[in-house]
Amino acid sequence: MKITALAGGVGGAKLAHGLAQILPPEDLTVIVNTGDDFEHLGLYICPDLDTVCYTLAGLANPETGWGRANETWNTISNVETLGGPSWFRLGDQDIATHLERTRRLKEGQSLSQITKDFCKAWGIQHTILPMSDAPVRTMVDTDEGELAFQEYFVHRRCEPKVKGFRFDGVKEAEPAIGVKEALKSADAIVICPSNPWVSVDPILQVVKEIKKPVVAVSPIIGGKTVKGPAVKMYSELGIDPSALAVANHYRTILTGFVLDNQDLNIQTEIDNLAIETLVTNTLMNHLADRARLAHDVLHFIGSL
Amino acid sequence: MKITALAGGVGGAKLAHGLAQILPPEDLTVIVNTGDDFEHLGLYICPDLDTVCYTLAGLANPETGWGRANETWNTISNVETLGGPSWFRLGDQDIATHLERTRRLKEGQSLSQITKDFCKAWGIQHTILPMSDAPVRTMVDTDEGELAFQEYFVHRRCEPKVKGFRFDGVKEAEPAIGVKEALKSADAIVICPSNPWVSVDPILQVVKEIKKPVVAVSPIIGGKTVKGPAVKMYSELGIDPSALAVANHYRTILTGFVLDNQDLNIQTEIDNLAIETLVTNTLMNHLADRARLAHDVLHFIGSL
């Protein structure tokens, strides 16, 4: 079975990693959100792309899910000494990624070519693609005005109340080379358990249409998220935060929906949306959970 | 006694450090070569300026004389993994300096303002000035063509044979704010034991004229240098490399010249150039040697 997965950061990376443990390299492509990308300290930083790459390479920090394992922080602490911006915590190993990416972008290389080279250097065999080589910037409309995503997410710690989202540049942004092909050649598309508003929506808006069966895994479990502001966002937008809200979010494109055992009580409501459901344990606390959930998802897709 | 010192990298930084241990902050200004500055990995790097600052701040690597003490190399080793340029060894702490400087330059701050702020952050009380806020680039004419200085110095390890030097941009480059004032208000100018061709000449060409007594300390001792390619350069240019060659190099501006005990035999020849001489131990192997030599130099200046 050939799968193309859409992923944002930590949660998405975990399921992508699970899929990569089961599927051979030629059968899995992961398309990653780049709406969170930003320039900071002169560095071109792609948080979601790096999280997915580090995770598939086995280089990710197991505590945080993002950043590098065995990381040191000597550069950023010295930037702080010099009075520079240190609110975005960049580790020493991680900075190498941003420095070399920035250098290559300035040379004229595309983000997808750079990502391909980095994946090779990190020993990643599956294909990881940025959603686009063109800049798309997630802007968060809040009660304190519009904020660039990282400004909202990291600097302001998601404190301002969300009123809406805008993906700057999305209309002009072509999908990166390989994205359309991966969507066309896949047997099914898996939407990983990432934030629907700010991780998955940018990808969906860039790719515009998907003609294959789509299965989404809920990032909301028992009304909560493992990480990130999805629940807070739904609430602030006046939507009851639940797996049902997620299924509704994607309803126009969904064939199947995977929800957690904790949400068994809303399975019927999702069935009523004419979406097939799989109820299983979607928590990925341990490394082995990733392949287990990926296996369940693939089995579910096979049954549709 | 008010002193303005002209310095390049390691040797110059050592004597500047010695002078800083004796003179109060208001009586010492160090003007530093920026001809070696270059952009690399998207970072604006000022090797001599950083060496002088790190040395005066007590942050320099005591083994190498350049870079930071207790340095780690996690960023550059990861840049190497990604296939990026790693021939210029940038430590993790050191990278913070370049990142924050580059960020501020892009914001429109001047190199001298940035240097002032960094010195404050590092607890340096004496004044350290870049020779100019405008870019001046030392170009080395060699038997393999013209090379940018760091390309010649670090990447090619000074292997190509030198035929001459050119300081790109030097005609248009104004001295940085404070440089003219420091040269005017000083009782004497000390040329530190730095490379005459590539560390001191760029400064002299930027400042154009000096109307105060000038005392130079020879970087060549017994026909050798402690560090760097000065001897190789003199030889390749057809000049016998010696303290005499250095005295001759600066003869039009020199009042006094400090040479090492090992070069006692050429003292008379320098006297014959109508330059006052001091013969002393000019080696600065240990920390205490710096203040000792600085003391000798200041005493010599007082006697002129």
Image (cartoon, coloured by chain):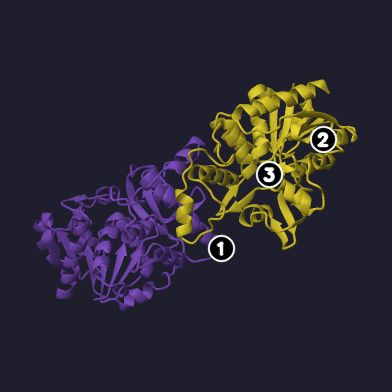
Chain colours: A yellow, B purple
The residue sitting at 64% across, 30% down in the picture is A17
Q: Position of residue A265 (x, y in %)?
A: 82, 35
**Picture residue at 25% right of the left edge, 68% below the top:** B252
* Mark 2 or 1, closer to the camera: 2
Labelled disc at residue A265: 2
Distance between mark 2 and mark 1 Cα atoms: 55 Å
Residue position marked by numbered label 1 in the rendering: B107
User: In the drawing, does residue A187 fall left or right of residue B90?
Assistant: right
Q: In the image, which disc is placed on residue A34?
A: 3
User: Around disc 2, counting alpha carbons within 10 Å, would you say few (fewer than 14), some (14 to 19), or many (20 or more)?
Assistant: few
Check if mark 2 and mark 1 are on a common chain.
no
Within 10 angstroms of label 1, few (less than 14), some, or many (20 or more) residues?
A: few
In front: B273, or A259?
A259
Alpha carbon separation for disc pair 1 and 3? 25 Å
Which secondary structure, mark 3?
A: loop
Classify residue B50 by image quadrant.
Answer: bottom left
**Which quadrant of the view contains residue A49?**
top right
Point out residue B259 in the picture as x, y percentages from the top left corner: 16, 60
Give me the disc on residue A178. none
Q: Are marks 2 and 1 in contact (CB under 8 Å)?
A: no
In the rendered image, the vertical position of residue B116 relative to residue B224, given as above or below: below
